[in-house]
Amino acid sequence: MDAAYLDGVLERLDSVDVVLGAAADGGYTLIASKRVEPALFAVQMSTERVLDETRARAAAAGLTVACLPARHDLDEIDDFAAALAGGQLDHAPRTRAVVQRLAALTTP
C-alpha cells in the first residue's frame, strides 16, 4: 500500500465509520475504523464471503462503510504472481524481493 492509498483511507474516514480495502478473493486487504468494533472480526476468515460478512456486521452495528476497489492480497502462491505481474509491489522493493524468492521456490 502506498501513501496515496492510505491517504485516501483517512480521507474516507472523515465521512464514514469504517473503510474496507477489498481483496480480489472476496476478503479485504485493509480495515480502518473510527472505533473498536469486535463484531467486525467475528467472521470466518479465508473464505470468499469475508468482505460481504464484514460489511453486513458493520451495518448491523449501525456503522457506515466505504469500500475501496479490489486489490490482490498475498494469501496464496497465485496471489504472488498476480501482485508481481500487476506492479502492486513496485513501490515496496523489499517485499517485492521476498515475494519473487517465494514465487521462485514454488515454481516447478
Image (tube, helix red, strand yellow):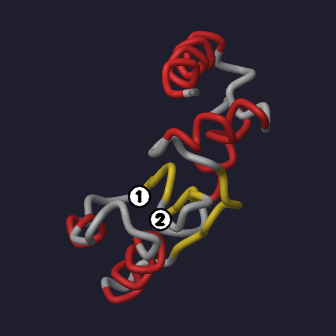
> What amino acid is at disc 2?
Val
Neighbour tally class for label 2: few under 14, some 14-19, many 20 plus, Cα within 10 Å: many
Q: Position of residue 15 (x, y in %)?
A: 60, 67
- Left or right, 34 with respect to 40, comes to right
Q: Is mark 2 on a helix, strand or loop?
A: strand
Determine whether label 1 and label 2 are within 8 Å by CB: yes
The N terminus lies in quadrant: top right
Neighbour tally class for label 1: few under 14, some 14-19, many 20 plus, Cα within 10 Å: some
Between marks 1 and 2, how big is the CA–CA gap? 4 Å
From the viewer's perspective, is residue 18 above or below residue 61?
A: above
- Residue drawn at 73 percent across, 36 percent down: 4
- Residue drawn at 46 percent across, 71 percent down: 48
Relative to the observer, which residue lies in front, 50 or 97?
97
N-term mark: 1 or 2: 2
- Left or right, 5 with respect to 62, comes to right
Q: Identify the residue at the far front of this view.
A: 108
- Residue drawn at 39 percent across, 79 percent down: 53
Q: Position of residue 43 (x, y in %)?
A: 27, 71
> What amino acid is at disc 1?
Ser
Q: Name the residue under label 1.
A: 33
Relative to the observer, which residue lies in front, 99 or 4?
99
Q: Quadrant of residue 84?
A: top right
Q: Name the residue under label 2.
A: 18
- Left or right, 20 with respect to 89, comes to left
Q: Position of residue 102 (x, y in %)?
A: 50, 21
- Left or right, 90 with respect to 68, comes to right
Q: Position of residue 81 (x, y in %)?
A: 66, 35
From the viewer's perspective, is residue 18 above or below residue 73?
A: below
